[in-house]
Image (cartoon, rainbow, N blue to C red):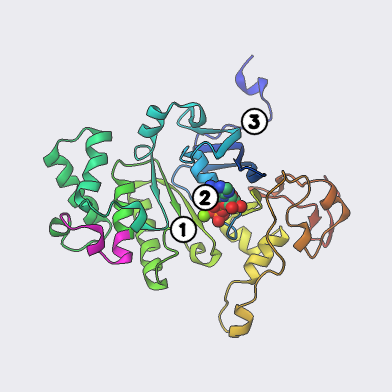
């Protein structure tokens, strides 16, 4: 019997570079457990730009840190899940193999380059180290490549800047250095966790333009975390919306903007500034509090804030369900028809 007929429901997409299934991460503390990530599944295709959005505390960072096994255990524990990259399950790799993946097949950029860059070492050294460690380049080759990388991310006079320390760069330039480091070993996947949040809007836009250009040139896949849907609208292929440690909606970017199917996504879109909108309207935010994550969600975590809440939402947590081709939403309410879904 062939594999396909043994698993008739599962379609394996050869273009998928990263596949996360049922990932669940908790934090242990003395008095309680924090259910930070509660069984989420998603995939990333080759060359794709996937934006991950959701308000602060929705589990975006914990998801990505779990994938890369960067969380200290304890207090963190990955209690379930699989993370497939290049035919392997990352969660079963030993620390040595995992170090080869990080900075090798997967590059990372974090929010604050001041804490991720080593302040007492030149940026040149920080660029050359992964090149020597992962690719085995000699010093002179690594130096040449480091200069090329700085130039690639748009740092002027890279041959001079290579011997500067992080504090000698502006915030935007430091973030470019972080991207250069993340790109050093030609990663298949770049994961960027709110990398431009601390920067002003013009520089944010410049960095996104740069990443867009690099993606075309290098052909890598990107996961870009942000709490601002507006920032990634012009660049993302797909958007995944998280809430309460769950994926509540995932769709191609145009589809998500045109037909948001989860009330939380709709509320997020309503908070975006639009041309001609008065300032007070722009400052509109979603009323109510984000969920406390001290119990595993057995109901919809958005129910207390949801304008369409049904009894069922409090009894039964909606899973990620397809609403159309390539679009899924975890909601019992059919927002397009204005009535509960009758097909699930
Ligand atoms: P986001 O990146 O979406 O803002 P996070 O993934 O950082 O959110 O956090 C998800 C949840 O996990 C939050 O409730 C947060 O308080 C909790 N959390 C994150 N790190 C820790 C930690 N080290 N110990 C306990 N709880 C944590
Ligand atoms: Mg975060």
Of 331 and 80, nearer the camera is: 80
Is ligand 2 within 8 Å of the beta carbon of the residue shown at mark 1? yes
Residue bearing mark 1: 194
Looking at the rendered image, the quarter that the N terminus falls into is top right
Q: How far apart, in angstroms, are the residues tagged by discs 3 and 1?
A: 33 Å
Instruction: Give whichever of discs 3 and 1 has the lower sequence position.
Output: 3
Disc 2: CA contacts within 10 A as few (<14), some (14-19) or many (>=20) = many
Vertical placement of residue 33 versus 192, above or below? above
Residue 65 rendering spot, x and y as whole percentages: 49, 44
Q: How far apart, in angstroms, are the residues tagged by discs 2 and 3?
A: 28 Å
Which of discs 2 and 3 lies nearer the camera? The answer is: 2
Instruction: Give whichever of discs 2 and 3 has the lower sequence position.
Output: 3
Q: Which residues make up the magenta segment?
A: 162-174
Q: How far apart, in angstroms, are the residues tagged by discs 2 and 1?
A: 9 Å
Residue bearing mark 2: 61
Compared across the picture, whether 224 is left or right of 146 comes to: right
Residue bearing mark 3: 10
Residue 319 within the segment the image draws in magenta? no
- Determine if residue 59 is in view: no
Looking at the rendered image, the quarter that the C terminus falls into is top right
Vertical placement of residue 62 versus 233, above or below? above
Q: Would you identify the image quadrant in which residue 23 lies?
A: top right
- Residue under the point 54% across and 61% down: 227
Compared across the picture, whether 300 is left or right of 3 comes to: right
């Amino acid at each position: 019997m062939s594999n396909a007929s043994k698993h008739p429901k599962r379609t394996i997409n050869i273009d998928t570079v990263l596949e996360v299934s049922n990932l669940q991460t908790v934090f242990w503390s003395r008095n309680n457990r924090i259910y930070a990530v509660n069984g989420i599944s998603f995939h990333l295709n080759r060359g794709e730009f996937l934006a991950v959005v959701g308000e602060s505390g929705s589990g975006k960072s914990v998801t990505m840190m779990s994938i890369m096994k960067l969380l200290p255990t304890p207090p963190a524990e990955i209690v379930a899940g699989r993370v497939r990259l290049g035919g392997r399950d990352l969660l079963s790799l030993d620390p040595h193999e995992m170090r080869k993946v990080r900075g090798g097949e997967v590059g990372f950029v974090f929010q604050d380059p001041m804490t991720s860059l080593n302040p007492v070492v030149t940026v040149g050294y920080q660029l050359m180290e992964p090149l020597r460690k992962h690719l085995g380049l000699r010093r002179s080759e690594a130096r040449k490549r480091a200069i090329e990388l700085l130039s690639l991310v748009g740092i002027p006079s890279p041959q001079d800047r290579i011997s500067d320390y992080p504090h000698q760069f502006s915030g935007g330039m430091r973030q470019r250095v972080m991207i250069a480091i993340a790109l050093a070993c030609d990663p298949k996947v770049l994961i960027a966790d709110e990398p431009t949040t601390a920067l002003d809007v013009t520089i944010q836009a410049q960095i996104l333009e740069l990443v867009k250009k690099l993606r075309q040139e290098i052909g890598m896949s990107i996961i870009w975390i942000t709490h601002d849907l507006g920032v990634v609208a012009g660049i993302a292929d797909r958007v995944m919306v998280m809430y309460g440690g769950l994926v509540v909606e995932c769709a191609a970017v145009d589809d998500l903007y045109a037909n948001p199917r989860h009330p939380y996504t709709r509320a997020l879109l309503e908070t975006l500034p639009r041309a001609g909108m008065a300032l007070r309207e722009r400052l509109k935010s979603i009323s109510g509090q984000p969920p406390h994550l001290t119990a595993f969600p057995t109901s919809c975590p958005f129910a207390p804030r949801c304008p369409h809440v049904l009894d069922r939402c409090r009894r039964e947590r909606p899973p990620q369900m397809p609403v159309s081709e390539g679009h899924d939403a975890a909601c019992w309410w059919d927002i397009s028809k204005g009535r509960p879904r009758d097909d699930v």
